[in-house]
Image: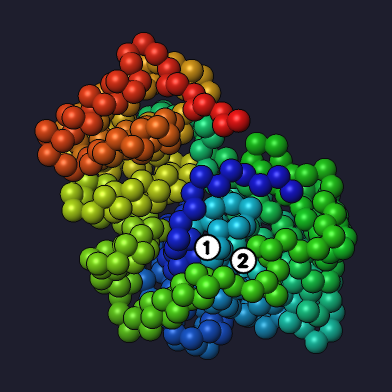
Amino acid sequence: MNQPSRSIRWIFLAIVSLFLVGHGQAQDKKAEPAGKHVTAAGMLLQREAGKPWQAPKQGAEVASGKLLVALPGAALDSKNGAVRLALLSDLDGISPFPVLESAVVLHPAGDADLDFTLDRGRVEVTNQKTKGAAKVRVHFRKEVWELTLAEPGARATIELYGRWPRGVFFSKDDKNPAEPTAALVLLVLKGEADLKYGNRQIVLKQPPGPALFQWDSAAGPDSAPQRLEKLPPWADPEAKPTPEAKERLARIEKVRQKLASEAPEAVIGELLKSKEPGERRLALVALGATDDLPRLLDALNHTEHADIREEAIMALRHWIGRGPGQDLKLYNALTQEKKYSPAQAEIVLRLLHSFGEADLGRPETYEALIAYLKHDRVSIRELARWHLIRLVPAGKAIKYDAAGTPKDRDAAYAEWKKLVPEGELPKKPEKKE
């Protein structure tokens, strides 16, 4: 399987499964019980549109139409108990996509055992019947797939991720906007599953067998499932967690205990003020995941900790890739709530995207980024630095703090001008013999 480039590798990738961003799915007209929370209080969070987050107790019914997110390992049973839905994460950063949080919405099951929308992230579905097949209906983007888990114990994982293609930038044209691409992986972990979508029907089997099926919004679905001889490490339930993953799991339990009795907004606030960088990373991603743009944009201008600004960039890049219209929402938040000028807001949006090959072949791109190092806004200075040290690795040696003194910033600016002279492209690193 071709895996996308992992430009985002965060220590706390998995922990951020904690929270959900609002999605574009319409709420069910009449909420009704659609499942049951089967893990400890604090593992699962739910929210109705316009209402605060809540942490249901173990055994509590979960209504259709509510936004659901969870700590890694949280699980729901379908209303009839036939299917278990687990919300998972990627503790070691080895899954196909840089997933930051998992988000689902349950719907009335109808003729299925479980019906839900996968907004993003990774979930696992398991047939819990004592005999017979279990039917799962999955909605994502504009797709509706039906997955039949053929026998008791059959299990599959589904992972969905969205991102902006390189070289596609922000446009205020809300009538015909560009859209981030989405990609999905379906992998049968155990047993056999029958997949129906559109007019097609395919059979998938656990490894060794035709176990993997992929889809993306640009190319559509694979022509046929891919055969795997064994489960990849990211999906193998028997793979041993790294020491780092064990440490993060211990931290997750501490967060769960707080969420069982405190409001999520307060928990995020505590983490944001932490002296520990890892907890601050979690807070920044959680701000994006809960659509707390005011505090997330404040973090992009934070003057005390540089890591807070960097993690805010990561969270915002992920946030705008979630789906159509996210770019415009962020632009409006910048201009209306944070009083950025339209020109400044457009610079921020442009810098939250990735440059394409044509842009990287123009000296003007680097000249603009270097000029932004002296911009009035801390956020724009930080975004320029973020791009420059990735595009010009030699620049990592230049000490630059977007919130530093004007004198120090001017000195770093002069060094960047020497490293990438006006009208020239950066020199390519010399290859080692």
How far is the residue under mark 2 from the one under mark 1? 7 Å
- Say if 16 sits above or below 129 in the image: above
Looking at numbered disc 1 in the image, what kind of residue is underneath it? Ser
Please tell me which residue is depicted at 35% across the width and 43% down the height of the picture.
Answer: 329
- Say if 332 sits above or below 229 in the image: above
Q: Secondary structure at mark 2?
A: strand
| Callout 2–callout 1 Cβ contact below 8 Å | yes
Q: Position of residue 158 (x, y in %)?
A: 66, 60
Q: Dividing the picture into quarters, in which one does residue 152 lie?
A: bottom right
Q: Which residue is mark 1?
A: 102
Please tell me which residue is depicted at 23% across the width and 27% down the height of the picture.
Answer: 413
Q: Position of residue 106 (x, y in %)?
A: 57, 68
For residue 135, side relative to residue 77 (left or right): right
| Residue 222 visible to an observer of this rendering | yes
- Say if 221 sits above or below 192 in the image: above
Q: Check the picture and name the quadrant holding the C terminus.
A: top right
Q: Dividing the picture into quarters, in which one does residue 209 lie?
A: bottom right
Q: Which residue is mark 2?
A: 123
Q: Secondary structure at mark 1?
A: loop
Q: Position of residue 33 (x, y in %)?
A: 55, 78
Viewer-proximal residue, 106 or 43?
Answer: 43
- Say if 385 sits above or below 4 in the image: above
Viewer-proximal residue, 174 or 53?
Answer: 53
Query: Residue farthest to the front?
Result: 433
Callout 2 crowding tier (Cα within 10 Å): few <14, some 14–19, many ≥20: many
Please tell me which residue is depicted at 60% across the width and 58% down the height of the picture.
Answer: 94
For residue 8, side relative to residue 337 (left or right): right
